[in-house]
Image (tube, rainbow, N blue to C red):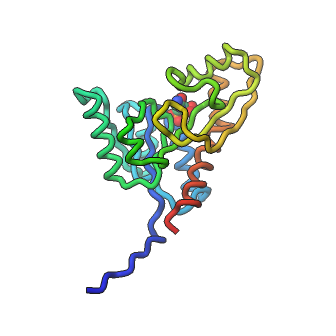
Amino acid sequence: MEQPVQNRSAEPFRLVVLVSGGGTNLQAIIDAIEDGAIQNAKIACVISNNPEAYALERAKKHGIKACCIRPADFSEREAYDAALLSALQEETPDLIVLAGFLVIVPKIIIHAFEGRIINIHPSLIPSFCGKGYWGLHVHEAALARGVKVSGATVHVVDEGTDTGPILLQKAVEVREDDTPESLQRRIMEEAEWKLLPQAIRMFVETEGKA
Ligand code: GAR
């Protein structure tokens, strides 16, 4: 029997965004899709490890499927890893975006989506990255060291912590009177919220279902 010809070009590039907190980077992605800066892509699902994450509310406000898979609900880490893997596989993502996701991504997930997971980190890697460097701690360490420039990095996720190939970086000036909070905010505004949508657009344009 003759099979109907599939029109793949009509299918948007599928993103799954993993979050843990406020979700301002998620919001930057949502805005970029809604205002057309990223075309032919949709957020299939937002997954949080934290039920209190405001990022979940942001997703719901925009009609995006959102769920929470909480490590504490599983007796063993392997069971959580398997549940997260299964939730991701169900969404058949073209790209998984870690947008402030504070759980170490397990190897089974990295291998299942090799080269298709990206992360935003709030410093110029290889400075202030790796174990223990997340959120405000990154900016506290940068100020304690007295750097004059910091910034943000988008990289592909590999088995290490913040060790994967760098895709994009943007430098941001550190000011004399900066606090960790003010530096975090400026790096978000001037770097993160621009770089992450830009990196996604690069993936959609080069690997999209055209
Ligand atoms: C962002 O600054 C992101 O770069 C950082 O957490 C914040 C999440 O903010 N991620 C890391 O530190 C990962 N190592 P958001 O929830 O408002 O997007």
Q: How many marks?
A: 0
Residue 16's spot in the image, x, y percent?
43, 48
Q: Is residue 36 above or below residue 148?
A: below
Outermost residue, bottom side: 1
| Quadrant, the N terminus | bottom left
Q: Residue at x 28, y 40 (%)?
A: 83
Picture coordinates of residue 108, whole percent (x, y): 35, 40
Q: Nearer the viewer, residue 90 or 116?
A: 116
Tell me, yes or no, if residue 54 can be seen here: no
Q: Position of residue 79 (x, y in %)?
A: 25, 34
Q: Examine the image and state in which quarter residue 123 appears.
A: top right
Q: Image quadrant of residue 59?
A: top left
Which residue is at the front of the view, 58 or 166?
166
Indicate left or right for 160 with 84 as reference: right
Residue found at x 66% / y 13%: 144
Q: Is residue 206 left or right of residue 117?
A: right
| Residue nearest the viewer, comparing 71 with 164 | 164
Question: For this view, does 128 lie left or right of residue 101?
Answer: right
**Residue depicted at x 63% and y 34%:** 188
On screen, residue 37 versus residue 49, left or right, reads right
| Residue with the most extreme top position | 144
Q: Judge by depth and name the residue closer to the eye, 132 or 166.
A: 166
**Eyeballing the image, is 72 above or below 179?**
below
One can see residue 207 in this view: yes
